[in-house]
């Protein structure tokens, strides 16, 4: 009995060592793949996965980095897509912002990335901050966007909840800098390998330096949070909207109404805020199918409605397409 226990423990140790070695090698490979581009004098980091004409751009959430979408990017690349993930300024391996960056400025940076990579058109997706940047890109550069993946968008109802959560973080990072720096140093000692994926993402957030965090959060208070409703109703591309309940920062009703307002939208309710990080199979399949749908040959659209009495014809309200869950 004792020998059996010893053998089992030894095998478990070998398995853990093999897994850690594989993860370390994988992390090293990913670091070698990091590339950079310049926009307004700042350096942005990005990674590319896969090849092909079907481009997909994935943008991370607030205070996270592009590793958030690493597994999804690899899955999409395996299905024949050219996928690009990017660190917004003040996140990940991109430069820390020297001034305030709002949603619109981030959208212009994503457009600059598309120009650098000679990508005329892409399916653009993002989580939270990334979802709002994708919406802004659609508003400012509609010709660039083949489709949208909007995970946890934060619209008008998010203003109160977002302020309640992020304002204390901003004040702590700005006015309690020694304490914040001490916490950052402590979490930098935590090794990322061996941690569950979602836990590793959280540790990365806790490792952040306080000044870039304060700058990023202050920048969000400048400019508009997202395109206003009338502009969102004009974004006529295939759109997958993912929302979940019980989150004041990303209100469920915001996601539902966004899908109702957009002419070609599908709404999917996530089981929780962590489903795409810890149990991704269901949502990942929907995203893969949605990207395939976006890249189908386009049908010729009918002409715009004629003006009646000097005013455009009223736009009909449409319900979102039902999800294929």
Image: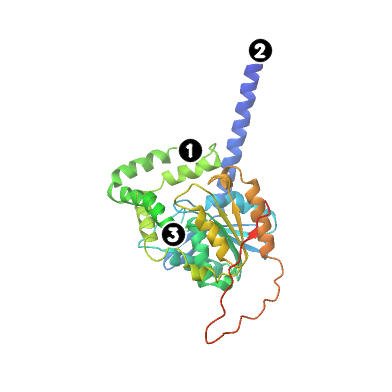
Is residue 86 at all visible to an observer of this figure? no
- Say which of marks 2 and 1 sits in front: 2
Decide which of tag 2 and tag 1 comes sooner along the chain.
2
Q: Which mark is residue 89?
A: 3
- Along the line of sight, which residue is nearer the eye, 42 or 220? 220
Give yes or no for contact between labels 2 and 1 (Cβ–Cβ under 8 Å): no
Secondary element type, mark 1: loop
Decide which of tag 3 and tag 2 comes sooner along the chain.
2
Labels in figure, total = 3
Secondary element type, mark 3: loop
Decide which of tag 1 and tag 3 comes sooner along the chain.
3
User: Picture coordinates of residue 297 (x, y %)?
Assistant: 72, 69
- Say which of marks 1 and 3 sits in front: 3
Q: Label 2: which residue?
A: 1
Is residue 311 at all visible to an observer of this figure? yes
The residues tagged by marks 1 and 3 sit, at their Cα atoms, a distance apart of 24 Å
User: Picture coordinates of residue 218 (x, y %)?
Assistant: 35, 58
User: Picture coordinates of residue 142 (x, y %)?
Assistant: 56, 72
Q: Label 1: which residue?
A: 191
Please tell me how crowded label 1 is: few (under 14), some (14-19), or many (20+) other residues with Cα within 10 Å: few
């Amino acid at each position: 009995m004792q020998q059996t226990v010893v053998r089992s423990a030894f095998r478990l140790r070998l398995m853990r060592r093999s897994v850690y070695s594989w993860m370390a090698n994988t992390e090293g490979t990913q670091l070698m793949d990091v590339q950079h581009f310049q926009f307004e004098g700042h350096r942005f980091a990005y990674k590319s996965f896969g090849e092909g004409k079907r481009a997909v751009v994935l943008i991370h959430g607030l205070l996270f980095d592009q590793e958030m979408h690493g597994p999804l990017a690899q899955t999409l690349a395996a299905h024949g897509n050219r996928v690009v993930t990017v660190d917004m300024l003040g996140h990940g391996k991109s430069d820390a912002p020297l001034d305030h960056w709002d949603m619109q400025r981030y959208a212009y940076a994503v457009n600059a990335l598309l120009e650098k990579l000679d990508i005329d058109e892409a399916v653009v997706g993002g989580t939270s901050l990334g979802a709002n940047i994708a919406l802004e890109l659609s508003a400012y550069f509609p010709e660039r966007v083949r489709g949208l993946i909007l995970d946890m968008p934060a619209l008008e109802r998010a203003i109160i909840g977002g302020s309640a959560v992020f304002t204390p973080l901003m004040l702590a990072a700005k006015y309690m800098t020694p304490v914040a720096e001490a916490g950052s140093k402590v979490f930098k000692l935590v090794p990322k390998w061996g941690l569950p994926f979602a836990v590793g993402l959280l540790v990365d957030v806790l490792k952040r330096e306080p000044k870039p965090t304060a700058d990023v959060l202050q920048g969000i208070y400048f400019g508009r949070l997202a395109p206003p409703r009338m502009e969102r109703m004009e974004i006529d591309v295939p759109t997958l909207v993912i929302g979940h309940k019980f989150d004041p920062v990303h209100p469920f009703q915001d996601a539902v109404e966004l899908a109702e307002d957009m002419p070609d939208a599908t709404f999917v309710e996530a089981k929780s805020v962590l489903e795409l990080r810890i149990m991704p199979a269901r949502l990942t399949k929907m995203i893969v199918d949605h990207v395939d749908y976006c890249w189908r040959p386009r049908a010729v659209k009918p002409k715009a409605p004629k003006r009646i009495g000097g005013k455009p014809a009223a736009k009909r309200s449409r319900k979102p397409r039902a999800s294929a869950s």
